[in-house]
């Protein structure tokens, strides 16, 4: 198991290195006259040249990347070209906001999808058809429409939750719950749709296998068969889908954070990209890659714990 985890960590580190290198080349090579964009169109050529030199843009791309990488491995991603704020500080403060939404949506979706998937697979009939309808609706309705509908009904109409803004949990727990509930619901819907289908299919497939019929013949009850044997086999594929959905939520959070005016990574990514604040965008890409790798390693370890065959593969 230790070798398995080490292999995953090493391959994850290599992946982060490759992603950061590709992102750096794409951002800096296609950045155009960055110094002039920072100073404005009316800046003199001398000032633009001095700014480019101060930012290190007059050096080769390789020299710029190795310098950035040597600082990045120590947690220093530079400073924003427009605000002067440390990139690491800005990204990590917003990362906590975004992760609170994504983790909340993932946990909620996992619980709801597990219940729906099990009910659909074991009960069949109208329950199965209802879950299918819910899944199709979850895929078909865009996330931003769900977010807007939630705001209109639960924030504007019923006034149960905040329509926009974010309250840190350290400031007020009830305020935090009020500010994140609707965004979490909007993000969770798509995950529920995908995961419930996966769990339903895996459970139905497992229930039809010969060893399950043997267990029934020995007199084991349905609850014990599902809890001890079926979920163990259906858990691996479901975890893989959950990991993919978690990573997908990093992109979905961009839209939801815009709708609810939440200061997370998505809002920072949009603002920095529009301004051309490349150090911040590089920090966002790198931190997002780290989060994706960490999630994949955790899922791989969980799958290996459930099914020892995964370690051999």
Image (cartoon, helix red, strand yellow):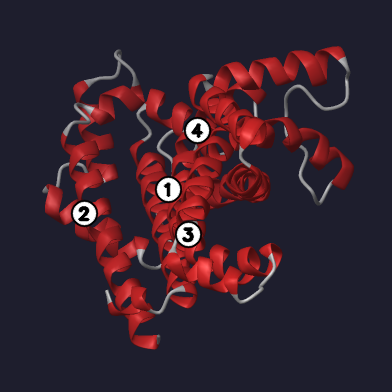
Q: Which residue is mark 1?
A: 244
- Residue drawn where x is 19% and y is 23% of the image: 45
Answer with mark 4 or mark 3, whichever residue precedes in sequence.
3
**Mark 2 crowd level (few <14, some 14–19, many ≥20, 10 Å Cα):** some
Point out residue 62 in the picture as x, y percentages from the top left corner: 13, 54
**Left or right of 229: which side holds 154?**
right
Q: Quadrant of the C terminus?
A: bottom left
Compared with residue 265, is residue 142 higher up or lower down, i.e. above or below?
above
Secondary element type, mark 3: helix
Find residue 273 and report its horizontal and vertical position in percent.
Answer: 38, 29
- The residue wearing badge 3 is 206
Which mark's residue is nearer the viewer, 4 or 2? 4
N-term mark: 4 or 2:
2
Q: What is the crowding at mark 1: few (fewer than 14 residues within 10 Å), some, or many (at least 20)?
A: some
- From the image, state whether disc 1 or disc 4 is nearer to you: 1
Task: Quarter of the image for the N terminus: give it.
Answer: bottom left
Which residue does the numbered mark 4 point to in the structure image? 252
């Amino acid at each position: 198991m230790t070798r398995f985890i080490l292999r995953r960590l090493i391959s994850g580190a290599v992946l982060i290195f490759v992603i950061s290198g590709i992102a750096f080349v794409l951002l800096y090579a296609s950045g155009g006259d960055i110094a002039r964009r920072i100073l404005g169109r009316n800046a003199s050529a001398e000032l633009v040249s001095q700014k480019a030199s101060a930012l290190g843009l007059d050096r080769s791309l390789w020299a710029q990347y190795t310098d950035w990488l040597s600082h990045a491995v120590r947690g220093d991603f530079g400073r924003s070209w427009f605000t002067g704020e440390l990139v690491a500080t800005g990204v990590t403060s917003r990362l906590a906001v975004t992760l609170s939404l994504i983790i909340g949506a993932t946990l909620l979706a996992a619980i709801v999808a597990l219940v729906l998937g099990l009910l659909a697979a074991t009960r069949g009939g109208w329950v199965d058809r209802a879950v299918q309808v819910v899944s199709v609706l979850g895929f078909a309705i865009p996330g931003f429409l769900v977010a807007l509908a939630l705001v209109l009904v639960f924030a504007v109409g019923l006034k149960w939750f905040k329509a926009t803004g974010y309250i840190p949990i350290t400031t007020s727990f009830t305020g935090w719950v009020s500010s994140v509930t609707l965004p979490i619901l909007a993000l969770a819907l798509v995950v529920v749709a995908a995961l419930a289908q996966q769990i339903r299919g895996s459970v139905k497939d497992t229930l039809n296998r010969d060893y399950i019929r043997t267990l029934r013949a020995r007199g084991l009850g349905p609850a014990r068969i599902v809890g001890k044997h079926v979920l163990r086999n259906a858990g691996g594929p479901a975890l893989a889908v959950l990991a993919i959905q978690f990573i997908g939520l990093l992109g979905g959070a961009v839209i939801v954070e815009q709708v609810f005016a939440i200061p997370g990574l998505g809002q920072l990514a949009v603002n920095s990209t529009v301004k051309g604040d490349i150090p911040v965008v590089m920090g966002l890409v790198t931190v997002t890659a780290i989060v994706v790798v960490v999630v994949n390693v955790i899922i791989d370890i969980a799958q290996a714990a459930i099914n020892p065959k995964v370690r051999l593969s």
